[in-house]
Image: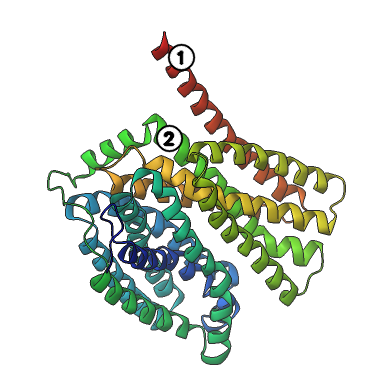
Amino acid sequence: MKNSPDGRNKKKESIILVVLGTLIALGPFSIDAYLPGFTRIAEDFDTTIGKVGLTLTSYFIGISLGQLAYGPIMDKYGRKKPLLIGLIIYFVAALCCFYSPSLEWLIVSRFFLAIGAAAGMVAAKAVVRDIFPVNEVAGAISVLMLIMGGAPIIAPTVGSFIIESLGWKTIFLFLALFSFLMILSVYSFLPESVVPNKKVQLRPKPILSKYIGILTHEKFWSFSMAGSFTIGAMFAYISDAPKLFMGNFDLTQKEFGILFGINAAGLILGSQVNRLFLKKYTTFKITYFNSVVLVVLAGLFLLNGLMGPNFYATVSLLFLILFLLGFQNPNTTALSLEPFATKAGRASALIGSLKMILGALASFTISLFHSPGVVPLATIILICLMASFILLLRFSGKEKRKLALSET
């Protein structure tokens, strides 16, 4: 393999990014692939769809707690071994889901499935921070987003096909096989990217203390929370989109699937256009400018809802919002990780957990509104994007004051 002038092996880095992108996609794929089977799961276990929803709740709990646990573990023992253990947990949990004799069994198995998936979500961002120069982290994460962004598009289609042909349990057999292939890929292609730090404490008190230290770091707090609020806006859209378009605009399931796929493609496109802008502008400038535009678009989206929503205006504004969210996620993640060369595992874990918590909170909030109108979704999106902008504005103001003081 040929190396670049700076001694880096570009081909090897590309292979690593593909492996990491697939790892980080495992989490959302595990959510979306089995969603088309909710009705059949309820029928098989003689229960309601609402109770089947507890399998999602247990998954969200597991993915949040799992990321917090893997952070210090990966800083202490390196990235590769804990990642392989996490994938093995995922493999076993997927088989347990496949053999579920009851809904309770499935709920518990989904929790451990999330614990396993969390390893990939933490490791992917931490390894990128380990092996790429600081000014290239956002671009590398944009590549991960390209691969990860395909999961919400592909998963429901794959899930529907498998469920119709072989039944809902076969979804988890497919996920078990997928995770087994990931174990082989990680073992074969992913190098250890950091020297294990045996001094890292795994007792609850020092772990909590370190997380508080990371969370209270001015740069981490500003960018991780700004990114988490943008994820909240995205989760609110994902949760409300079926009700909005099929309930308010009377789209068929097929028409909605096409529209959802187009919007998801906009999100992916944004993450890739972001890479081109990063060659000319700083990560913060792009993020700050996009945040201003997002607030304006969210305001127009709310105005559209209040005036009696127009279908084409609704679709266009949502596409533009999702397109710009494709910039914000990798950029805020990169800016959050920037100060933590030796604590990238814990910082990555905390970012992931915060995003899942804000995302779940936004999803829960939008579910409280039973009206299919645009206003509830537009209001939540505007609140999330305003909060993100305020955090970025506050950080920018503090940095300017610091610079002014240093020049006097």
What residue lies at 40% left-to-right and 48% top-to-bottom? 136
Left or right: 148 with respect to 113?
A: right
Q: Which mark is residue 404?
A: 1
Residue 176: % across, % down: 37, 79
* Nearer-the-camera pick, 400 or 203: 400
**Circle 1: is it few (<14), some (14-19), or many (20+) Cα within 10 Å?**
few
Q: Amino acid at mark 2?
A: Trp
| Residue 371 visible at all | no
Quadrant in the picture for the C terminus: top left
Assign a secondary structure to mark 1.
helix
Left or right: 277 with respect to 172?
A: right
Q: Amino acid at mark 1?
A: Ala
Q: Is residue 88 above or below residue 326?
A: below
What residue lies at 53% left-to-right and 84% top-to-bottom? 44
The CA distance from mark 2 to mark 1 is 22 Å
* Nearer-the-camera pick, 190 or 259: 190
What residue lies at 62% left-to-right and 49% top-to-bottom? 324
User: Which residue occupies the extreme top position in the image?
Assistant: 408
User: Which residue occupies the extreme front position in the image?
Assistant: 5
What residue lies at 46% left-to-right and 34% top-to-bottom? 222
**For residue 387, which quarter of the picture?**
top right
* Nearer-the-camera pick, 388 or 325: 325
**Residue holding disc 2:** 221
Left or right: 365 with respect to 169?
A: right
User: Which residue occupies the extreme left position in the image?
Assistant: 198
Name the mark nearer the viewer: 2 or 1: 1
| Residue 33 visible at all | yes
Residue 150: % across, % down: 53, 68
